Image (cartoon, coloured by chain):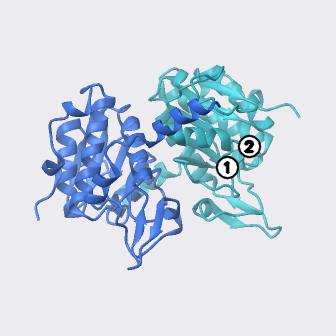
Chain colours: A blue, B cyan
C-alpha cells in the first residue's frame, strides 16, 4: 500500500456519522461501573470514578453495519423491542420512519414462540434495547433462530447476541441518538433519502419525555 | 404457555438440519485444548483428554441464522475466504452452488481497502473460515465496516466477528459438512430448491483431498 492510499484508507475509517462530540454530549460513551468479559473489546478506558467508558468509534461502526444489514430485510419483518421506558419512544420513532414493527412495553411470553398467542409475531430479525431488560425477547429469538441485534452496555453479556452495538443503553439522550442514527442510515441504505440532510427529523424528536 | 404449546416449541427447537450423529461423525464437535472467554457459551464440556467439546445444537442454529441472513444479499456481493487448505475446496463448492465470491489461498493485503489493488473487491458481507488464520481479511472487513460471519473454534476470539458459527474449523470433514449445510440452507432460503432432497450434491463433494 502506498502512503497516499494508506491516507485514504485512514480518512475513510475516521469518517463517522456524527462527531465524537455529538456522541459524548448525548452520553453514548458513558457505560456502567460493571464490565463483562463479553464487552471488554468495546471499552476505551475506565474513569477515575469507576465508570467504564465506551469507544464511540466502535459504536458508530456497529450502527452502520446494523443499518446496512437491516436494510436488506422487509421492514415489517424486523421487530424492535424495549421493555424499559427510555427506549420506547425512540423505537416508536424508528418504526415510524422505517416501517419496522415495534413492541414497546412488556414483552409477553410466547409472542415469538406460541402461535396461539394474541400478539403472535414471526420476525426475521430482532433489535433489543437491552439484552438484560429484554431477556424474554432474547430467549424467544434464540429459540426460533433469528439474528439478534442489541444495544449493549458495559454491564451486558452478549450471549445469543449476534450484532452488539456498544452504547449506553440506559440514558434518554443516548438511546435517542442511537435509534435516530439507525433510522437515518436505514433510510439511506433503503434509498429513501440520498443525504443526511434529507432526514428531516431531529434527535430531540426521538427523545423520551422526562 | 400451555403444556401442549411448550411441547410444540421444544420439538421445533430440537429440529436440527442433520442429526447430532452426523455432526459428530464429521468431528464438528471436536474443539481444541484451548478455550477463549469469547467462545465459552458454545462449549458443551471438556473431555478427559483435555479437548473442549462444542455444543452442536448451537452450531446447527447458527448455520441456519447465517444462511437465512446471507440469502438476503446479492450472492456476488458475499465474499468467502480461507487461507488454510482444508477450507478451500469447501468454499469453492459453496461458491459454485450459491454464486458467492470466493478467495481461497493467501489473502493479499489491501484486497478490501486499496482501490488500486489488482484484486480489489468490495463485498457487503464476508465469511471467514478461521478468524485467526484469516486475520488479514478480518481486519480489512472491520476497516470497511461490513458484517463478519466466521467459523469459530474453541481457541478463537470473536473480536470483530458478528455472527460466530461454533465449530471445529480445522478438520477436513467438519469444514465440508458446515459449508455443505450453509450452501443447502442458502439455496432453500433463496428459493432455488424446495427441500433438502433436491440438493443433489453430497458432503463428500465438499471435502478437500487428503
- Relative to B106, say whether A141 is above or below: below
Q: Mark 2 points at which residue?
A: B174
Residue B194 position within the rendered picture, expressed as x and y whole percent measured from the top left: 51, 24
Question: The N terminus of chain B is located in which quarter?
Answer: bottom left
**Secondary structure beneath label 2:** helix
Residue A81 position within the rendered picture, expressed as x and y whole percent measured from the top left: 27, 53
Residue displayed at 49% across by 30% down: B124
- Outermost residue, front direction? A3
Which comes before the other along the chain, label 1 or label 2? 1
Q: Is residue A156 visible?
A: yes
Please indicate whether residue A103 sits to the left or right of residue A70 in the image: left
- Outermost residue, right direction? B210
Foreground residue among B9 and B109 = B109
Query: Is label 1 in contact with label 2 (beta carbons under 8 Å)?
Result: yes
Question: The C terminus of chain B is located in which quarter?
Answer: top right
- Relative to B88, say whether B39 is above or below: below
Q: Distance between the residues labelled 1 and 2?
A: 8 Å
Foreground residue among A110 and B190 = B190
Residue B5 position within the rendered picture, expressed as x and y whole percent measured from the top left: 36, 55
Crowding at mark 2 (Cα within 10 Å: few <14, some 14-19, many 20+): many
Amino acid at each position: 500500500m502506498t502512503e497516499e492510499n494508506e491516507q485514504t484508507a485512514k480518512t475513510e475509517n475516521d469518517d463517522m456519522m456524527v462527531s465524537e462530540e455529538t456522541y459524548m454530549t448525548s452520553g453514548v460513551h458513558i457505560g456502567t461501573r460493571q464490565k463483562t468479559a463479553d464487552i471488554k473489546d468495546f471499552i476505551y478506558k475506565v474513569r477515575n470514578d469507576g465508570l467504564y467508558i465506551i469507544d464511540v468509534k466502535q459504536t458508530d461502526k456497529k450502527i452502520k453495519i446494523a443499518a446496512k444489514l437491516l436494510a436488506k430485510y422487509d421492514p415489517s419483518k424486523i421487530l424492535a423491542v424495549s421493555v424499559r421506558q427510555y427506549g420506547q419512544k425512540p423505537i416508536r420513532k424508528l418504526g415510524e420512519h422505517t416501517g419496522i414493527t415495534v413492541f414497546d412495553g412488556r414483552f409477553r411470553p410466547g409472542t415469538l414462540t406460541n402461535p396461539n398467542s394474541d400478539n403472535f409475531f414471526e420476525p426475521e430479525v430482532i433489535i433489543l434495547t437491552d439484552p438484560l431488560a429484554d431477556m424474554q425477547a432474547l430467549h424467544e429469538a434464540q429459540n426460533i433462530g433469528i439474528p439478534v441485534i442489541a444495544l449493549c452496555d458495559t454491564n451486558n453479556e452478549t450471549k445469543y447476541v449476534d450484532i452488539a452495538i456498544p452504547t449506553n443503553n440506559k440514558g434518554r439522550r443516548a438511546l435517542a441518538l442511537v435509534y435516530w442514527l439507525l433510522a437515518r442510515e436505514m433510510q439511506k441504505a433503503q434509498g429513501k433519502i440520498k443525504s443526511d440532510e434529507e432526514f428531516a427529523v431531529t434527535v430531540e424528536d426521538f427523545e423520551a419525555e422526562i
